[in-house]
Amino acid sequence: MITIVRSILSGIAVSLALYGQAQSIDLKTWPEKANPTTVGRLVAQRFVESPHNSFKPPAPPKSITYPEVCTWYGALKFADISSDKALLEQLTQRFMPLFDTEKHLLPRPWHVDFAVFGTVPLELYQQTKNKTFREMGMRFADAQWSIPIDSPQTVKDAYQKFLDQGLTWQTRYWIDDMYMITMVQSKAFQVTGERKYIDRAAHEMLVYLDTIQKENGLFYHAPDAPFFWGRGNGWMAAGMSELLSSLPTDNPNRPAILASYKKMMASLKKYQREDGLWGQLIDKPESWVETSGSAMFTYALITGVRNGWLDAKEYTAITRKAWLALVGYINEQGDIANVCEGTNRKNDYQYYLDRKQKTGDMHGQAPILWCVNALLKK
C-alpha cells in the first residue's frame, strides 16, 4: 500500500511539473494546487491543529523541539505576508501557555537546537509589538554568546576558546548549526538593529564554511560520516539564505559567504533529479527521494533567484520544477510525505538508505512554509 501511495504521489508531482513547465517558466504563475497561498493556508492550518511534538512519539514532549520551532516560524511569516490576522491570533494563542501552564516546555538555551526557539518570540514581537515576546527571544539570542554561569569551570574553559575566536560557545561544526545559530542571531538583528548580532552570525558562518564545505560545494554529515545527507545539507542551504537575506552589503564576510552559497547551488543544480527533487543522499541516484532536504534546497533557490544572487535564466526553470514536484507530495490534510526521520550521524552508507520515511513530520512541514513565503515575498 505504501509503495502504491508513493507511486501515486510521484505521478502527481511529475504531472504538475510537466503542466507547470508547459504553462510558464516563471515563479509567479502556478496551477491552483501549487499556488503558494493555497499551499500556505493548508500547511499552516495543519500546524495550528497539531499538538506539540516529540522526537519519540507517543511519549509527551519534554520541551518544544526545533522542528516545531521552524514550522511555527514559517507559519508566522505566512500569517504576516498574507495579512491573515486570524492565523496570527491562533499562532499567538499557541504560544501564550508557555508563560504559564506549559512553562515546563520552554527549552533551556544551552544548545544550538534549543536556542533557535528564540526565533519564534522575536517574530511574534515584530508582528504584535508585545515587549514580553522580545524579552524572551533576546534571552535566547544573547545566551548563544554567554556561557551559563552555573557551568563547571572545566566546561567554561573548554567553551572559552570559542568565545576568544568570536564564535558562540555552542560551536560544534555540525551542519544543522548554521541554521540554528544564524536564524536567531539574524532575527535579533532585525529586532534591535544592533550590528553585533548579524556580524557575529556572519563570522560564525564563514568559519563553518572554511572548515566543513567540500570542493563540490556540499557538506558531509560529519567528518566521521562522509555522506552528503540531504536534510543536513538543507540546513546549510537554508542558513546561508536566511543570513544573506539580512546581512548588510558592507559586511566584510558577505562576498565569501555568497560565493559559498553559489557554489552549493551549482552543485545542487547538477544533482537535481529528473522529477525535480533530490535524494536522501544527494549524489547517490539509487537513494530514495527525500522531501525535507529538497524543500530546503528549493527555498534556497527561490531566495537566490528572487534576490538576484543566482542567474534567473539558469536557475528559474529548475526552481520551478522543484516546487511543482514538492507540492505533489502534500496530501489533502496538508502533510508532506517522504520525510527522513530524525537522523544522527553514522559512518554507514546503508544506515542512511534505511532511515524511515515519514509523512507530516515537521522537518518537512517547515521548509514548505519557507518556500511559500519566499515565493510570495515582494
Image (cartoon, rainbow, N blue to C red):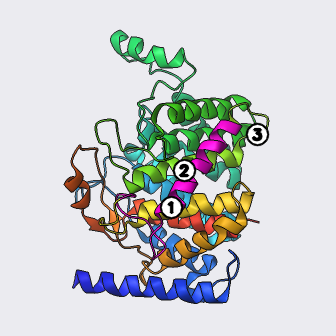
Q: Secondary structure at mark 1?
A: helix
Q: Which mark is residue 270?
A: 1
Q: Counting residues from the N terminus, which is met first, the one under dot 1 or under dot 2?
A: 2
Q: Is residue 41 left or right of residue 6?
A: right
What residue is shown with label 3?
Answer: 248
Query: Residues under labels 1 and 2: Cα distance?
Result: 10 Å
Amino acid at pointer 1: Lys
Q: Amino acid at mark 2?
A: Met
Q: Quadrant of residue 33?
A: bottom right
The answer to whether residue 75 is visible is no
- When asked about the image quadrant of residue 85, the answer is bottom right
- In the image, which is nearer the foreground, mark 2 or mark 3? 2
SS at circle 3: loop
Q: Residue at x 31, y 47 (%)?
A: 62
Question: What x and y, as percent, mark residue 341?
Answer: 30, 59
Residue density around tag 3, few if under 14, some if 14–19, many if 20 or more, within 10 Å? some
The residue nearer to you, when weighing 337 against 62, is: 337
Judging depth in this view, the residue of 67 and 377 nearest the camera is 377
Give the image location of residue 332, x and y in percent.
43, 84
Q: Amino acid at mark 3?
A: Pro
Mark 1 and mark 2 residues within 8 Å of each other at the beta carbon: no
* x 52%, y 29%: residue: 143
The residue that label 2 is drawn on is 264
Residue 214 is inside the magenta segment:
no
